[in-house]
Image: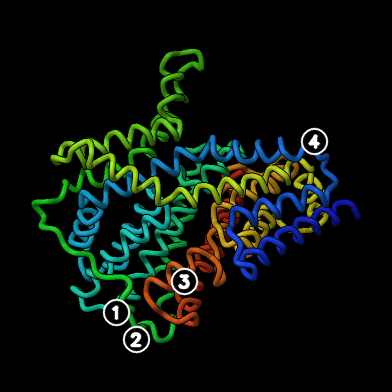
């Protein structure tokens, strides 16, 4: 018991050190994560000869599974923006659902963009569109921003091939089709609460000023936009390919060519690569752009997410240290004495890491190293564990969190108003999501 408690203590001290370096010393996240991981390794008595291999394994493990996914996601988002596909999706869904159902339309738009693009990309694409819609409809802009961001953050946190959920699916060996099915069950009531109902409880929502940083999007004429069908198909294509491939594998022998082909095409990397090629054709070459122009878009997209990708990789080092030192197993042994659902414990662990580190994907990846042993120890559904951790990684945050700052600085609102809006919707996302996962655990084993 004492050794297990000491292991937990070292993790808490290491994460506290991480927060101090980021918040007080203004140290770069990558350096801070590596130093914190080294502190935990030394505190746990890891052999000096094993520390460097652990760092290499942690970095390599994350980059090998997530690098291409993050890069391809940024490219798809860039091509959708430059071609006007994002505007086409927003215009069509809003037109079909009308002013009365506008908040629900924006829930759908936010979720689609969140699950198909890196979050910062989805934010910067959707927000100017939503401000334009709010001005046209004469609705206070924040009443429409909240449902959009609620959908985007939840879609990004729950559905593969986004980095956080993809890392959880890989670590827990969860069935990806079930993650989509149960993820949809989780996300619907959650974003209705966090994007629609919550607005009735936020005072002063209609009077929040809009700064001059985020401008309304300039509308392109409909004739310049790609069709709605192709605009919506491209961002959803990876999910469709992975689901179809998983279903096909249920009905054929593992030694068959169809099974092997489905495994290949249904992998996150290949499905994303195919989607990138499709996007380059329909949003680039087919619309008269040259190879040079398309390459510039791809280069800009990759440059934009390079820092985020390396921060995620550094989070992988922290996770690997927790695994290689055996801390994860000892924490499981410690919390096994608590009369609490392992899903709640997994959620709490991920919430704490997200609040302390300010990175959703890092929280999911780090929590995976701690939580993975719980699945076998407590006979928990890997899919529900993925969703519990995913909800935990999407929670209320503090001033050093990238999502918090992006929201606050983009609209030029006060810290108080940011906590009332971003903070509240993120808390509801996380808490209601956990409640739905717990309800599912009553019938899913």
Alpha-carbon neighbours of circle 2 within 10 Å: few (<14), some, or many (≥20)? Answer: few
Alpha-carbon neighbours of circle 4 within 10 Å: few (<14), some, or many (≥20)? Answer: few
Q: Which residue is at a point 62% across and 64% down the rendered structure image?
A: 22
Badge 1 marks a residue whose secondary structure is loop
Image coords of residue 360 (percent x, y) = 54, 56
Q: Using residue 336 as the reference point, say whether residue 304 is left or right of it.
A: left
Could you tell which of marks 4 and 3 lies nearer the N-terminus? 4
Task: Measure how far apart labels 3 and 1 are at the Cα level.
Answer: 16 Å
Q: Which mark is residue 422?
A: 3
Q: Which mark is residue 394?
A: none
Task: Measure how far apart labels 4 and 2 are at the Cα level.
Answer: 59 Å
Could you tell which of marks 4 and 1 lies nearer the N-terminus? 4
Q: Which residue is mark 2?
A: 207
Task: Measure how far apart labels 2 and 1 are at the Cα level.
Answer: 7 Å
Which of 404/426 is in front? 404
Image coords of residue 183 (percent x, y) = 48, 49
Q: Which residue is mark 1?
A: 140
When the figure is inspected, residue 127 is found, relative to residue 295, above or below; the finding is below
Q: Using residue 249 as the reference point, say whether residue 441 is left or right of it.
A: right
Could you tell which of marks 4 and 2 lies nearer the N-terminus? 4
Badge 3 marks a residue whose secondary structure is helix
Which of 401/292 is in front? 292
Q: Which residue is at a point 45% across and 31% down the rendered structure image?
A: 267
Could you tell which of marks 2 and 3 lies nearer the N-terminus? 2
Could you tell which of marks 3 and 1 lies nearer the N-terminus? 1
Callout count: 4
Q: Which residue is mark 4?
A: 49
Image coords of residue 159 (percent x, y) = 46, 47
């Amino acid at each position: 018991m004492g050794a297990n408690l000491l292991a937990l203590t070292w993790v808490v001290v290491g994460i506290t050190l991480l927060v101090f370096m980021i918040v007080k010393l203004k140290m770069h996240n990558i350096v801070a994560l590596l130093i914190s991981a080294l502190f935990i390794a030394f505190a746990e008595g890891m052999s000096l000869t094993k520390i460097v291999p652990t760092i290499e394994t942690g970095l390599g493990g994350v980059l090998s599974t997530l690098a291409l996914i993050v890069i391809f996601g940024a490219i798809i988002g860039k091509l959708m923006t430059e071609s006007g596909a994002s505007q086409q999706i927003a215009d069509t869904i809003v037109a079909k659902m009308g002013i009365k159902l506008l908040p629900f339309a924006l829930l759908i738009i936010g979720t689609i963009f969140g699950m198909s693009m890196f979050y910062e990309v989805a934010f910067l694409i959707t927000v100017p569109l939503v401000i334009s819609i709010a001005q046209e409809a004469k609705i206070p802009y924040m009443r429409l921003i909240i449902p959009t961001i609620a959908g985007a953050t939840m879609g990004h946190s729950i559905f593969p091939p986004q980095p956080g959920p993809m890392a959880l699916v890989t670590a827990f060996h969860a069935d990806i089709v079930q993650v989509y099915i149960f993820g949809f069950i989780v996300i619907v009531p959650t974003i209705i609460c966090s994007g629609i109902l919550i607005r009735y409880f936020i005072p002063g929502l209609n009077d929040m000023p809009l700064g001059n940083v985020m401008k309304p999007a300039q509308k392109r004429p409909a004739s310049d936009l790609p069709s709605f069908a192709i605009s919506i198909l491209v961002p959803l294509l990876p999910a469709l390919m992975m689901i179809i491939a998983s279903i096909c594998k249920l009905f054929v022998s593992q030694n068959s060519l169809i099974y092997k082909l489905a495994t290949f095409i249904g992998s996150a990397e290949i499905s994303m690569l195919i989607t990138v090629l499709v996007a380059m054709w329909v949003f680039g070459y087919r619309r008269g752009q040259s190879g040079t122009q398309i390459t510039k878009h791809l280069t800009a997209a990759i440059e934009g997410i390079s820092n985020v990708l390396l921060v995620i990789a550094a989070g992988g080092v922290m996770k690997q240290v927790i695994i290689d030192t055996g801390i994860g197993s000892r924490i499981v042994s410690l919390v096994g004495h608590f009369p609490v659902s392992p899903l709640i414990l997994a959620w709490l662990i991920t919430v704490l890491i997200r609040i302390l580190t300010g990175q959703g994907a890092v929280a999911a990846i780090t929590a995976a190293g701690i939580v993975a042993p719980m699945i076998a120890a407590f006979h928990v559904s890997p899919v529900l564990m993925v969703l519990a951790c995913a909800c935990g990684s999407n929670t209320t945050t503090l001033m050093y969190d990238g999502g918090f700052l992006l929201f606050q600085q983009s609209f030029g609102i006060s810290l108080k108003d940011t906590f009332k809006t971003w903070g509240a919707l993120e808390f509801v996302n996380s808490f209601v999501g956990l409640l739905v996962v717990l309800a599912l655990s009553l019938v899913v084993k």
